[in-house]
Amino acid sequence: MSDSLKTISPVDGSVYVERAYTPLSRIEEMLDAARTAQKAWRKKSVAERATLLTKCVDNFVSKKDMIVEELAWQMGRPVKFGAGEVGGFEERSRHMIAIAEAALQPVEVQEKSGFTRFIKREPVGVVFTIAPWNFPYMTAVNSIVPALMAGNAVILKHATQTHLCGERMVEAFVEAGLPKDLFQIVVASHQTAAAIIQSDKVNYVCFTGSVPAGKAIEAAAVGHFLGVGLELGGKDPAYVRADADIAYAAENLVDGAMFNSGQSCCGIERIYVHADVYDDFVEKFVEVVKGYKLGSPVDPETTLGPLVNAAAADFVRGQVADAVKAGAKSLIDPALFPENKPGTPYLAPDVVVDVDHNMRIMTEESFGPVVGIMKVASDDEAVSLMNDSEFGLTASVWTNDEAAAIRIGDQVETGTWFMNRCDYLDPALAWTGVKNSGRGCTLSSVGYESLTRPKSYHLRTKI
């Protein structure tokens, strides 16, 4: 194994960032320092934490221009859209700071004569966040800011592809006055991350990533009696009903499928369309896709950047090729996207029809700018197909009937159910998944529950 972390830019294949791995001896020192810093931090009031963390967020947001360019070079996000990552970070941070006072209040119980009884929410201690590359700031913030607001310390391991994003967060927060040992970043391999989990010096692990990696996290945590929150993969479906606004649905579902080059856990990867509007929807969907421009993410005109690496692009190409061989039809001519080159991260978007659930493209996470579209005859058929998946992160319905949306949503196995939107996290709502999309929750007041432990107070006041 190499003795350093290397970020290979998908823009041109160059080494964009290189860092030496943190020695285990230094990691032990970091964990001990975090535990000491947390003991002092937990004594501060929620209001004091909120004031300081607001300054941290302000300082981070002020670095937007630098962050946007670095995102493009690290993971291929077009500079045209990079500011949205900073906006999402800010929205989630400010919301979780704003609701902390109420969310962390003691839980009152029914009055009982002669007793005072309540449940306090105490910080768990040290939170170990393992963040992914695809939305490197917005995914990390889901646990980092709430963990700090709840009185915890945070150790961050960021993905190799976006390690610099982790450094930028820590730098911005420490510059703003956060105690440096309270929020630290470690340069760690997978094996070292497992050693941190098994050190008995962290109290909760918050991980976003693949299903196999999630299983490895759980295996490392066995026998150590610490909480583990897992946000894993998705194969998120959409259902377009006959009463939908077809032009609106097509435009927004293209964005849900293609944004970030399709590299979103909650991106749209499969669409089911009622037979009555199927042809019209597919025609409009393909028209919107053809309007994208594939190219270098540092070009301000680019709307579709490269995938994270050539292997990821070739994986999607393989899914499409297998589907076509089995009878499916690709509707996008790759010649429309001259930058598309096999063996590189640059991949043309695609829309595939005449598909079914015997094809990998409809069952296996793609994580690329491709979507399969199937015709259905009824709500019941759509529900059955949406549920025919090992994943359950988000799902959406496109309709003008709110009652129908709720009725259908009650039957769909998913963590978040949308009507007439997709691929968005509202920080006021619990972010969670079912089946192989993981377990646990971040964001909303519910997200504070895993970052705190209940402590019951049972006081006899009359003897």
Image: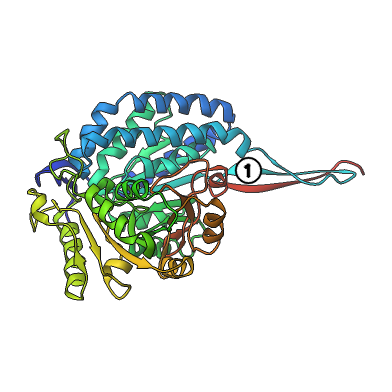
Quadrant in the picture for the N terminus = bottom left
Nearest the camera: 267 or 136?
267
Describe the element under mark 1 as helix, strand or loop: strand
The quadrant in which residue 173 appears is top left
Query: Is residue 274 visible to the viewer in this orientation of the structure?
Result: no
Q: Where is residue 301 in the image (x, y as percent from the top left)?
A: 16, 35
Nearest the camera: 121 or 83?
83
The quadrant in which residue 404 appears is bottom right
At 33% from the left and 61% from the top, the residue drawn is 278
Q: Where is residue 395 in the image (x, y as percent from the top left)?
A: 43, 57
Which residue occupies the extreme right position in the image? 463
At 26% from the left and 46% from the top, the residue drawn is 260
Residue position marked by numbered label 1 in the rendering: 121
In this view, 347 is above or below 151: below
Q: In this view, does 113 lie to the left or right of 4?
A: right
The quadrant in which residue 101 appears is top right
